[in-house]
Structure formats: structure tokens, C-alpha cells
Image (spheres, rainbow, N blue to C red):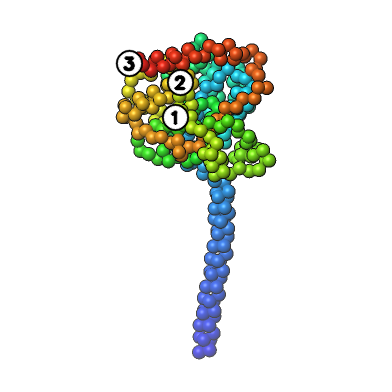
Amino acid sequence: MKAMEYALWSVWLSGFLMICLSFYIINNSASSLEYPRQSTSRFSHLNLGFEDELSVTPKITIFTSPDPFSNAIWFKMSLSVSSWIQLSKNISVVLFSRDLYVHQFADEFGPRVSVDPNVDFAFLGTPFFHSMVARTQAYKSDITVLVDRETILLPDFISTLRYAHELDLDWFLFALPRNITRFSFQPDEDGHHWLDEDAKDFKMKQMQEFLSQVGHLANGEERMLMAWNNVGSPLHIGVVPPFLYMKGVHNQWTVNEIFSSNIRFIFDATDTISSFFETEVDPRWAPLPGHSTDWKAENVSWEYDVNRYMATRK
């Protein structure tokens, strides 16, 4: 009888020990699995500006065309192009130009900034607007952007395009930049923040307030940001006249044509995209060797007259 009791006690004790051992193994396994999950979560949060940003931001290609290069244009475009490519790693920039100095300029920014000479130019070196728009179709991109070479963009540009990208239709947006007489800010080393003259960080909200106080909206005659999706689909019905780029009229003409064609949803994003350009030019900034702009300044009015004439032709 006692042998039977000892046997039962030994079975019960063995079962109890097995249960305790099972709990111990389960707890250790759970704790060992919990640490990697927490570590991965924290890593993803810290890495939000890279892989996660690439997954949520559409592929954007920004197109522009520089004037014949001078030290002033080199400096201004350095600010503007830097502001573009720092907004997202999914942004690339294409410069329409045949100027050798533009190739040197693009090399400073690496592979995300390239030069494309394959558009039509007038004999003074001004590209034709219709040729630029047509050439954008050669690039695979979710969103195409055409903007003035000196326009600086702030981060709400990306948030606006992300919103537009979610729309299940063909769309076109435009935004007018603000004209700043003197811009005394510089980007920091990472290019993510603006520093004032005292090297103090200028927040995004402060920059927007600054622009609204001292900036004046451009009239759209020359400077306007345009963006659209589905590059393979037409912007409007009809043929674009041979407008000279940045010589007036073609921006308003394009917006009116897209609106009247009624094949794309069109909206004004001026209030949601913070953009600006500086008009003050330091007289010490001279043309680069082999580039003289004096003769062009004296004979430029006829280019505007040509665009106005083209806009009246049907």
C-alpha cells in the first residue's frame, strides 16, 4: 500500500516539475522573442525618413531649364535644386540645356541631377516650351513637375503631391511662387532646415509666416509650378504653339487649355505649396567665362512679343 502511495506521489511530483519546467521554457521563449520585436519597431521609427519614406512618396521628376550660366544663376540654382532633392529620395531633377557649365553644375549633386540637351532651342538658346513638355514623356515617373529654375520649394510640396497621387483620376495642379526681394537664409549641412543670418534654425511654420509677410505672389506670366500624373495621357486637346520658355503667356495658356479640354481634374495649389524665388541680384556676380548676358537683356522684349502673338493664333 505504501509502495502504491510513493508511486502516486512520484508521478504527481514529476508532473508538477514538468509543468513548472514548461512555464519556465515558455516564459524564456516569449521574452527572447519580445526583444527583437521592440528593437525592429524602434529601428523602423528612426528610419522613417528612408525606407518608409521611399514607400509612401511617389516617384517625382522635376524639370527646368537654366539661362546661360553666370555666378548669380549658379548660386541661386544651387539653393533651389538643393531644396528640391532634399525633400525626398524619390525626387530626381532634369535640366534641359546644352551649356557645358550646366553639366559641371549637375555633377555637384550626383546622379539624381542630370542634363538633357534633347529639346528644341531657339537661336538665342531659349528652349521651346512645347518641346520641353513633350520630352518629359521620355522619363518614367509617377508625377512630372515643371518649375522655374530659381524657385525654392518647402516640404509641403511633398505632402500636397502625396495627396494628389492618391486621387484615382488624371489631374493637373499649378502653384504660384512668392517673390522675395532679399532672402538671407541658408540650408544646414543636411539640407533639411533653413538657418537665418545668426545660424539659428528657422522652422517650417516660421518660414511660411515669413513668406506670407514679405513675399508677393508672382503673376504667373513667367513663373509657375506645374505638376501632373499619368505622363502618357495628354494634358489637353490641341496643339501647343511654339512658345519660348520663360518668356510669358505659355503658363496661362496651358492652364486655360487644360481647363477647357476637361480631360484632367485641375486645381490651384498655391495655398498648399510653399514656394518662392529671390529677385535681388548682387552686382558682383558676373557672367562666367564665355557667357555675356548684356546683349540679351537689350534685345529680349521681342521674345515676349512672339509668345503673345502665338497665343492669339488659332
Decide: is 42 above or below 115. Answer: below
Residue 298, given in percent of the width and then of the height, sits at 55, 12
Classify mark 2: residues with Cα within 10 Å, few (<14), some (14-19) or many (20+): many
Residue 172, given in percent of the width and then of the height, sits at 39, 31
**Sequence-first tag of 1 and 3:** 1
Residue 260, given in percent of the width and then of the height, sits at 32, 27
Mark 2–mark 3 contact, CB under 8 Å?
no
Q: CA distance from mark 2 to mark 1?
A: 15 Å
Q: Which mark is residue 297?
A: none
**Sequence-first tag of 2 and 1:** 1
Q: Amino acid at mark 3?
A: Lys
Q: Is residue 222 left or right of 278 when viewed as pictured?
A: left
The residue where tag 2 is placed is 248
Number of labelled discs? 3
- Secondary structure beneath dot 3 equals loop
The residue where tag 3 is placed is 314
Q: Amino acid at mark 2?
A: Gly
Q: CA distance from mark 2 to mark 3?
A: 18 Å
Classify mark 3: residues with Cα within 10 Å, few (<14), some (14-19) or many (20+): few
Q: Amino acid at mark 1?
A: Met
Decide: is 272 above or below 305. Answer: below
Kindly indicate the quadrant of the structure image that contains residue 227.
Answer: top left
The residue where tag 1 is placed is 226
Residue 18, given in percent of the width and then of the height, sits at 54, 72
- Secondary structure beneath dot 2 equals loop
Kindly indicate the quadrant of the structure image that contains residue 221.
Answer: top left
Of marks 1 and 3, the one in the foreground: 3
